Image (cartoon, grey):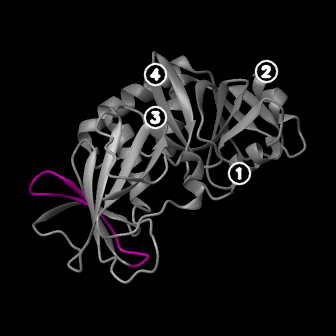
Amino acid sequence: MKSVRFAVAGVTFEICANTVGLELPEAFNLFDLKTVEDESLSTVSDLIHIEVVSSAAGEPVGNLDWLSNDPAWQVGRDDAGHFVFHVPGPAPARWLSINDSFTRGTLTGDFSGLPGPIYPFHTFDIITFANWLASQGELLIHASGFSWNGRGYAFIGPSGVGKSTLVANLLGRAGLTVLAEDQLAVRLFGGKYWIYGTPWHLRPGLYSNLGVPLEKVFFLQRSPGSALNPISPQEAFKQLLLKGFIPYYRQEVLEGIMDGLQSLTQAIPCFALAYQLGEDILTQVLNA
């Protein structure tokens, strides 16, 4: 059995297949743990194991209780209590059945006849990771971020507000590492919140596999002028709810997520930020 492995924010993914050739996308190079044959990861504590099965039948057998019906993907629950995710395209249609702790699952699709090695876990990877974090009361957020001398700064806001542009303009500064331009993982270790880069981005070079303690959070705003103002933990909590990947179809994890967000916004200084291109945004952020 062949496997591909990658690690994000301290969580190791192992994807295995007997009859399907596997290959990670280029964007995963920084997170790749290299292709191995018959090597067990049973001693890794934070492990997500996925077995890929090529089957012409595709769709799981049995009754499904559908919980969400997004155009891009659907999620239901089967008679055994497993979550079942369905991604209709691009072809072939794929199904992921995974346990309720999001640590072990089976990915099924008709992969016969596809040329060369493939990455069938596309779309399922970020869904699985977000759900695994949610089980710990942690979160994947729609945000950019950077590390400055070992401290993390996160920038959250709607699409088009300038999250990617902000970190792209800081790329190459001495002492600065861009962690992410679109997706950040937020985790709690040793009583401190950390942010981690992830591989799910659109622009090459604007992400990293590093993690650093979170220093400050900035909520970007559209404005004709510039402004930098502290905001209350209550307001930061509300805005994080809008930008976090929260699986509302899993009632059992929501309380832990809400508690985690409340704790984060109490512990980390949060600001509203509007900036204009050409400003020394790094100095403003560091001195906030």
What residue is shown with label 1?
205
Which of pointers 2 and 3 indicates the residue nearer the eye?
3
Ranked by sequence position, the earlier of labels 1 and 4 is 4
At horizontal 76% and vertical 30% (from top left) the residue drawn is 228
Q: Quadrant of residue 258?
A: top left
Q: CA distance from mark 4 to mark 3?
A: 11 Å
Q: CA distance from mark 2 to mark 3?
A: 30 Å
262 or 189: nearer the viewer: 189
Which of pointers 4 and 3 indicates the residue nearer the eye?
3
Label 4, secondary structure: give it.
Answer: strand
Magenta-colored span: 75-91
Q: Position of residue 83 (x, y in %)?
A: 23, 54
Label 2, secondary structure: give it.
Answer: helix
Residue type at tag 3: Gly
What residue is shown with label 4?
189
Residue type at tag 1: Gly
At horizontal 18% and vertical 52% (from top left) the residue drawn is 82
On residue 287, which mark appears?
Answer: 2
Ranked by sequence position, the earlier of labels 2 and 3 is 3
